[in-house]
Amino acid sequence: MMKYQRRIFAYIHTLVPSRSDAEDILQETSLTVCEKFKDFELGTNFYSWACQIAYWKVRAARKKFATSKVVFNQEVLDVISQTRSQMEDELDIRHEALSRCLQKLNDRDRRMVLTRYESGKNVSAAAQACGRTVQGAYKALNRIRKVLFDCVSFELTAEQAR
């Protein structure tokens, strides 16, 4: 479960607008995966099996979200889930390219990006961690995002050419 936890969370978060709700559903999913692990068929795709459990947990949680401002009907939820599943391989390839591109950044820029996107952190925290002003951090992050976007695009194009 630990190997796939981040990917399962990303799957859940595509179906649930709130990060905290997605985290709660991930916990429920993890518990159910542990309880039902004896039902998992060895040799089959564990990630897909766990995502199916997560999907049903999201459906069950929809009652809780009914009072929320943003609620998808079941048809939209199904389309999002199906699209996410279909894009899984592409997302893995993009994630690997992003990892390579992050390694190409200088230490200060890499630390800024990683701090900014660490759970619960914001631009102010990234600025403080890197010795920049908040305004300077916003400018730097915009520049770094552009560099990463270009790098990932180049990596993907180069990989397709192989």
Image (cartoon, rainbow, N blue to C red):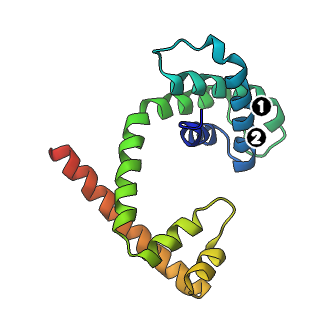
**Going 58% across and 85% down the picture, which residue do you hit?**
135
At which x and y percent is residue 54?
A: 65, 28
Q: Nearer the viewer, residue 118 or 2?
A: 2
**Going 37% across and 64% down the picture, which residue do you hit?**
103
Horizontal relation, residue 2 to residue 24: left or right: left
Which residue is outermost to the left? 162
Look at mark 2 in the image and give the residue it sits on: 24
How far apart marks 2 and 1 lie (CA) works out to: 10 Å
Look at mark 1 in the image and give the residue it sits on: 61
Quadrant housing residue 28: top right
Picture disc at residue 142: none
- Mark toward the start of the polypeptide (2 vs 1): 2
At which x and y percent is residue 145?
A: 43, 68
Q: Element at badge 2?
A: helix
Mark 2 in CB contact with mark 1 (< 8 angstroms): yes
Against 127, is 21 above or below?
above
| Count of number-bearing discs | 2
The amino acid marked with disc number 1 is Ala
Quadrant housing residue 100: bottom left
The 10 Å Cα crowd at callout 1, few under 14, some 14 to 19, many 20 or more, is some
